[in-house]
Amino acid sequence: MANSVPKEFDIKEPINHKTYLIDGIISDWKGDYSEVHSTILSDKKNIPHKLIGYTPKMDENYALKALDAADNAYKNGTGKWPTMKVYERINCMQKFVDLMKLQRDEVVKLLMWEIGKNLNDSQKEFDRTVDYINETIKEYKKIDRDGAIFQNNSGVRALIRRGPLGVVLCLGPYNYPLNETFALLIPAIIMGNTAIFKPAKHGVLLIAPLLDAFQQSFPPGVVNIVFGRGREIASPIMKTGKINVLALIGHSSSAISLQDLHPQKNRLRLVLGLEAKNPAIILDDADLDLSINECINGALSFNGQRCTAIKIIYVHEKIKEKFLNEFCKKIDDLKMGLPWENTLLTPLPEPHKPKYIIDLIEDAKKKGAKVLNKRGGEVTNNFVFPAVLYPANEEMRVYKEEQFGPVIPVISFEKIDVPISFMAGSNYGQQVSLFGKSEKKLGPLIDSMVNLVCRVNLNSSCQRGPDVFPFTGRKDSAVATLSVHDALRSFSIRTFVASKDNEINKEILRKLIDNKESNFVRTDYYL
Ligand code: G3H
């Protein structure tokens, strides 16, 4: 198997990543290291997991050094970075994205090895992140232009802009270790905040090639990158009370325990992307081919390891048989392969995941479901072939738990109240996919669904993109909204200068603008 690795993607020797970035200095780590294993070539016997590298196992002491660096750079909002001219911050970001682009091949290779994402999707993750940064720069210029206008109301003149919030602790997920982490980090820093960033559980080595770009692009202390376990790094940082924004995409249990450590919770802003259990609802007049294709992609791209994945399917009784037959056939035809073979199904990066998926299948079987597709639940090394479970019911673990993997529970319904009450009773409220044709049926359904979730997808699978659209959720699915525009708002607050409209103030404002004495009170446009 190892011989089948194409030369350009091979990792001959484990990558010894030794460095971290604190206060603008890239230093060598002198302490213990964590091993980074890849599951993609696992054959259980000879290669249980391949060792592909080492990363620093940093501790509380260094976590607090990173916090001090970010805190000093922010200096309660008086530091160089938060008070800098907007275009200077934009120039730093532009430099960063130009340097980042040079690391594309290395990051893409590591995405494949560390999380098993296929080549196309790994390239897409990188390119989407570059686009996201470029769009963020454009959007920030627009927000800045909109803030360059004085308003006058009831004898008070005001210049209202958006200002930073403080020090951000930034923690991303393993399924999008580059893109989603940067979807938090980039808007946070461009708005004038400073940050401490700890890479996800899997997808750590791929951050290493970007350390130089961060160091060369931003002033000391603006971005601090540390490696280690959440418990050693994030917990002590939260306990100090110096974090102003917890930016986390991952599990609600981590978000809750980290919030709880903050001694002054009212000062803590949350930007969270959490779990979801997005249903697909297939009405009796749905176009079957289209619904099946969208459900397969929606449920199984990156093996279902997406918060936006379709995680349960409700199909109308009238078409259930046709739907299930065709759906299962098409799933059984899917190919499993290594990431560079660009198959839809690839190995699961978490060593314990196959067992978890099999446990969900066994639990559902005990409670009355069958695995409908022939290959469902086959396990080879770290691959699990997707299983279609029917009929699922509320007693089953897979009905409630976010499986985040290749298993698809299906329930049939006659009355639309069945999927609606699932959604109303669910802890999650991110998205839904509705499949059908009649506007008479769809209209009222859309009106209910938009208040149960935050995105209703019509005859389309659930997804986050395009990144200019709002990405958020109700209940336990999210706090705050992410999109190119909304993220800039989420990481900032409105702040303004107001003056009674008299001659003295007019004169001061005129001079401030003419002489460019303030980076805040100005009316120029960045093009
Ligand atoms: O894991 C959750 C991601 O935000 C899903 O994003 O729909 O672009 O794959 P995506």
Image (spheres, rainbow, N blue to C red):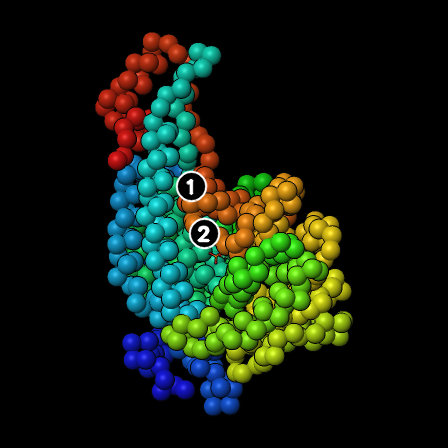
Q: Please state which of the two labelled residues, at mark 2 or mark 1, is closer to the viewer.
A: 2
Instruction: Estimate the x, y position of residue 218 in percent, counting from the top left.
Output: 30, 50
Instruction: Estimate the x, y position of residue 377 in percent, counting from the top left.
Output: 61, 77
Which image quarter is the C terminus in? top left
Query: Mark 2 near ligand 1 (CB under 8 Å)?
Result: yes
270 sits left or right of 324 in the view = left
Residue 101's disc number: none
Front-most of 245 and 114? 114
Q: How many marks?
A: 2
Is residue 404 positioned above or below 446 on the image? below
Q: Earlier in the sequence, mark 2 or mark 1?
A: 2
Residue 63 visible in the picture: no
Residue for point 26% across, 61% down: 102
Instruction: Estimate the x, y position of residue 21 in percent, counting from the top left.
Output: 35, 59
**Element marked by disc 2:** loop
Q: Residue under circle 1? A: 485
Q: Residue under circle 2? A: 465
